[in-house]
Image (cartoon, helix red, strand yellow):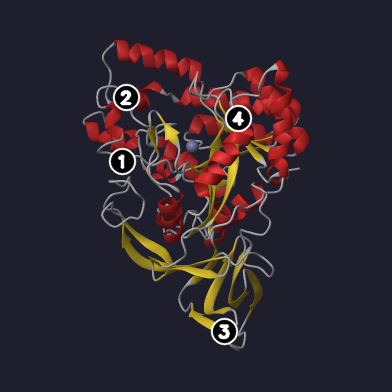
Amino acid sequence: MGTLIQNGTVVNAGGQQKADVLLEGEHIAQVAANIPPVDHTIIDATDLLVMPGGIDVHTHLDMPFGGTVSADDYRTGTIAAAVGGTTTVIDFALQSRGHTMREAQQTWLAKADGKACIDYSLHMAITDLGPEGGAQGLHEMEEMVLDGISSFKLFMAYPNVLMIDDGLMYKVMQKAASLNALCCIHAENGSAIDIVVAQMLAEGKTAPHFHALSRSIKAEAEATHRAIALADMVNASVYIVHLSNAEALRELRSAQKRGIRALAETCPQYLVLSIEDQMPGQSWEEAKYVFTPPLREKKNQEALWQALEDGSLAIVSTDHCPFRFKDQKSLGRNDFTKIPNGGPGIENRLQILWHHGVNTGRLSREQFVELCCAAPARVFGMPQKGSIAIGKDADVLLWDPIAQYTISAATQLMATDYSMFEGWNVRGNARHVLSRGALVVKNGLWIGQIGQGKFVKRVANAGGLA
Ligand SMILES: [Zn+2]
């Protein structure tokens, strides 16, 4: 038996070729021209591109935030991901202060259990190393790595909730370096931003627009610089999440030029949305775009695209953190600080990047695969994923490069009542998707089994840079 994908064009980060792809069980068994069909289930890929399934390394499913919980759980979130062409997500387990990493790990694995419809892994967000110099927390980091959680998230924003100070960050980075683990950083100067926020509220500036104005690009650039400097002091590999602007990018590039092991991602929203277009300060509707870092001035988009083209930015993820407009975003109707931070994007990442990146000629097909599949697998220690090659997991995306699609909340599978890209027409969309050999999306429709996703134990490889 097995599944034979015929007549397609296989696109990997390293090149493309006309070839058939044979899947046996959960793996890719053969990639070659004209594989003779025996007892195989045939999938016709004429005019389709056969790519590795997308990997979204930054999602927040079923995550508590500001008195509510993100709208997608592991079931709806991973189905939406799959329909959008993504076959693996890495979600964030959040350690609560005064509690252990083990508790957070168990909490998040329980959220996924029986619900995850595609493969998933976890980063551990560290907020506390425990008493007495943090010996217990540092030991737990070793345990997390043994359990396949080979990246740690550190927040430089959200004082008193998630933010850690430089000393704690230094300590975690030092330990991460010894474990070959990767440090993922939310880089914004949270202390300074909180002062700005308090001053704005005191002046009656409570609309969503002010969320964006309160978090300057300088606050992100400063924290980006500081995180990289601390990582460099202890020889750790560092990965800046959701890098949103040209000044933070300058810090990243400057470090990379000096040979420092610094990587970063950006997200579709920063590439195609802006303060000018989405948050001009005119209506409550702008709460739909309250996320952190916020939207930036339009001129930053060009810099981010260039960084994707030249490889300074390694990955495009979503930071998918959905909240409904009607009854969740509304918690901050009179105070932007109470608007749950985040936007829905897990379903649209590949559509947006293809339409605005590949169709415009900015990115090649290979670069698209690199940014969305191959680099995520390499940087985050999943050597079995991210390419169409013999022995790899049979996570396969059959992409129709000329399919027309209109993005809309009315048809999306994400559990939000709005889309950040409402009414946008894109060309290029997922047609069929296989997850470890099982056809889970057929002609754009989810047909998979609820709960078939497996936890992916990741290797600690210092972001693929060591
Ligand atoms: Zn995030």
Identify the residue under disc 2. Answer: 336
Q: Residue at x 43, y 46 (%)?
A: 268
N-terminal label among 4 and 3 = 3
Amino acid at circle 2? Phe
> What is the spatial separation of the Cα atoms under label 2 and label 4, in whole angstroms?
26 Å
Q: Secondary structure at mark 4?
A: loop
> What distance separates the C-alpha of mark 2 from that of mark 3?
56 Å
State yes or no: discs 1 and 4 in contact (Cβ < 8 Å): no
Labelled disc at residue 126: 4
In what quadrant of the picture does the N terminus appear? Answer: bottom right
Q: Is residue 72 above or below residue 431?
A: above
Q: Which amino acid is tagged 1?
A: Arg
Q: Check disc 4 and give the amino acid type.
A: Ile
> Label 3 near label 2: C-beta < 8 Å?
no
Residue behind mark 3: 40
- The answer to whether the residue labelled 2 contacts the one labelled 4, judged by CB atoms less than 8 Å apart, is no
The part of the image, by quadrant, that contains residue 69 is: top left
Residue that numbered label 1 is attached to: 324
In the visual, does 215 lie left or right of 438? left
First reached walking from the N terminus: tag 2 or tag 3: 3
Task: Using the numbered discs, state the Cα–Cα distance from disc 4 to disc 3 in whole angstroms.
Answer: 47 Å
Inspect the image, locate mark 3, and give the three-letter code of the amino acid beneath it: His
Place of residue 293 in the rendered image (x, y in percent of width and height, measured from the top left): 44, 31
- Name the disc covering residue 276, or none: none
Question: Depth-wise, is mark 2 or mark 4 nearer the camera?
Answer: 4
Whole-angstrom CA distance, mark 1 to mark 3, is: 44 Å
Please say if the residues under marks 4 and 3 sit with CB atoms less than 8 Å apart.
no
Lower sequence index among marks 2 and 4: 4
Q: Position of residue 52 (x, y in %)?
A: 56, 63
Query: Which quarter of the image is occupied by the C terminus?
Result: top right
